[in-house]
Image: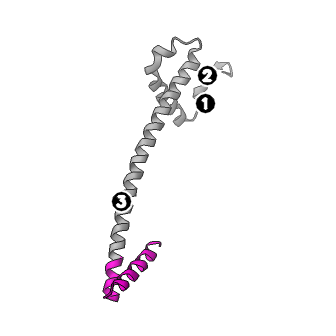
């Protein structure tokens, strides 16, 4: 692009963060240089190579997020189990059930409270 008689690279018009991100992406795509240099349209092939790198990063991020989600779900289940047991113990302390039916009623109350 020619601007006031001086040719500028379009990348210079990107914000600073964009310039850094693009430079890093192009650097990652260089590992595919042997492949994209064989293409009829090297620029397009380089773009596809960069897309491969972005896709790899996205898949890695999704896998990491899944591991974190699974860990958080396990922690939440442990917390729920502890909460359920604490409620059951408190209810037994308060109502002091003697019969199986009274114990079942306490379990129903605990189940109801666990919904909140």
Q: Which residue is mark 3?
A: 75
Decide: marks 1, 2 in contact (CB < 8 A)? Answer: yes
Which of the 4 quarters of the picture holds residue 1?
A: top right
Q: Residue at x 43, y 72 (%)?
A: 114
Taking the magenta stretch, the answer to whether it contains residue 109 is: yes
**Taking 81 as reference, is 6 above or below it?**
above
Q: Where in the figure is residue 39, as x and y percent of width and height? A: 55, 13
Q: Residues within 10 Å of mark 1 (few under 14, many from 20)?
A: few
Left or right: 16 as drawn, with respect to 69: right
Q: Residue at x 51, y 16 (%)?
A: 36
Q: Residues within 10 Å of mark 2 (few under 14, many from 20)?
A: few
Q: State which tag comes first along the sequence, 1 or 2.
A: 2
Which of the 4 quarters of the picture holds residue 12?
A: top right
Q: Which residue is mark 1?
A: 13
Q: Residue at x 42, y 42 (%)?
A: 63
Label for residue 8? Answer: 2
Q: Residue at x 43, y 46 (%)?
A: 65
Taking the magenta stretch, the answer to whether it contains residue 28 is: no
Which segment did they paint magenta? 87-116
Say what secondary structure mark 2 lies in: loop
Q: State which tag comes first along the sequence, 3 or 1.
A: 1
């Amino acid at each position: 692009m020619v601007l006031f008689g001086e040719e500028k690279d379009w990348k210079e018009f990107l914000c600073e963060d964009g310039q850094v991100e693009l430079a890093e992406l192009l650097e990652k795509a260089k590992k595919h240089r042997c492949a994209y240099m064989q293409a009829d349209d090297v620029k397009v092939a380089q773009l596809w190579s960069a897309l491969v790198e972005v896709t790899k990063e996205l898949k890695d991020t999704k896998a990491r997020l899944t591991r974190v989600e699974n860990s958080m779900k396990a922690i939440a289940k442990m917390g729920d189990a502890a909460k359920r047991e604490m409620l059951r113990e408190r209810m037994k302390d308060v109502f002091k059930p003697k019969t199986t039916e009274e114990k079942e009623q306490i379990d129903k109350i605990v189940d109801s409270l666990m919904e909140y």
